[in-house]
Image: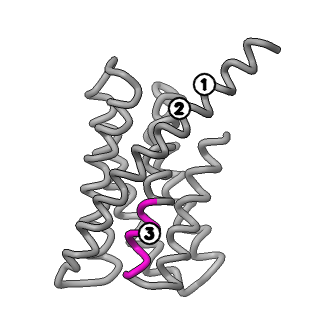
Amino acid sequence: MLYVGLYLMAAVFANLLVTWFGPASAPFVAFGLVALNLTSRDHLHDAWQHKGLWWKMALLIGAGSVISWVFNRQAGPIALASFVAFACSGLTDSLTYAALGERAYLVRVNGSNVIGAAVDSLVFPVLAFGWPPMWGIIVLQFVAKTVGGLAWSVLLRWWSNIRHKQTQVA
């Protein structure tokens, strides 16, 4: 449940912040929140594999967009762009994560984050801010999501190890 909460919180706050502050905020949001979203998605992949992964992820992506819209009706266009971008990036992220199979955790998470970040960084700004593409925002978002994803993967792995040790002691 923790990763569901992290995923939803990251998606909703990302949508609302971009709605309030516009395209210039996208790289900062990408580093802190979208990277968290991509990384927590991989934890959910492990938890839900063979237990309704695809429909649960679709529901979670939709819920993030709907909650964003409920909090701020002006977030509708951003929430819709986010929904499509998260669906596309989530699919590619999930396929990459699965293809990386038994590799080390950080390799799987960050390998899939790079692919998911690339797709999300291209799809979201085009849908949210229109044509022609804002290449500076696209590139900055990609770098921010990739670096942020690395930071989140290390932090969440460290935190998961601490929780695991605490349950072994108890």
Residue type at numbered disc 3: Phe
Question: Residue 31 vs residue 9: left or right?
Answer: left
Asked which secondary structure carries label 3, the reply is helix
Question: Residue 96 vs residue 68: left or right?
Answer: left
Residue 6 x %, y %: 60, 50
What is the quadrant of residue 81 in the picture? bottom left
Q: Magenta span: helix, strand or loop, mainly? A: helix
Residue 97 x %, y %: 33, 33
Q: Nearer the viewer, residue 12 or 169?
A: 169
| Quadrant in the picture for the C terminus | top right
| Quadrant in the picture for the N terminus | top right
Q: Nearer the viewer, residue 42 or 52?
A: 42
What is the quadrant of residue 128 in the picture? bottom left
Q: Judge whether 110 appears above or below 127 on screen.
A: above
Residue type at numbered disc 1: Asn
Q: Residue 28: which disc?
A: 3
Q: Residue 161: which disc?
A: 1
Q: Residue at x 56, y 51 (%)?
A: 7
What is the quadrant of residue 167 in the picture? top right
Asked if the residue at tag 1 contacts the one at tag 2, i.e. Cβ–Cβ closer than 8 Å, the answer is: yes
Q: CA distance from mark 2 to mark 1?
A: 6 Å
Per the rendered image, the range of residues in magenta is: 24-31
Q: Judge whether 147 appears above or below 3 on screen.
A: below
Residue type at numbered disc 2: Arg
Q: Judge whether 145 appears above or below 149 on screen.
A: below
Using a 10 Å C-alpha cutoff, classify the residue at mark 3 as few (fewer than 14 neighbours), some (14 to 19) or many (20 or more).
some
Q: Which residue is mark 2?
A: 157
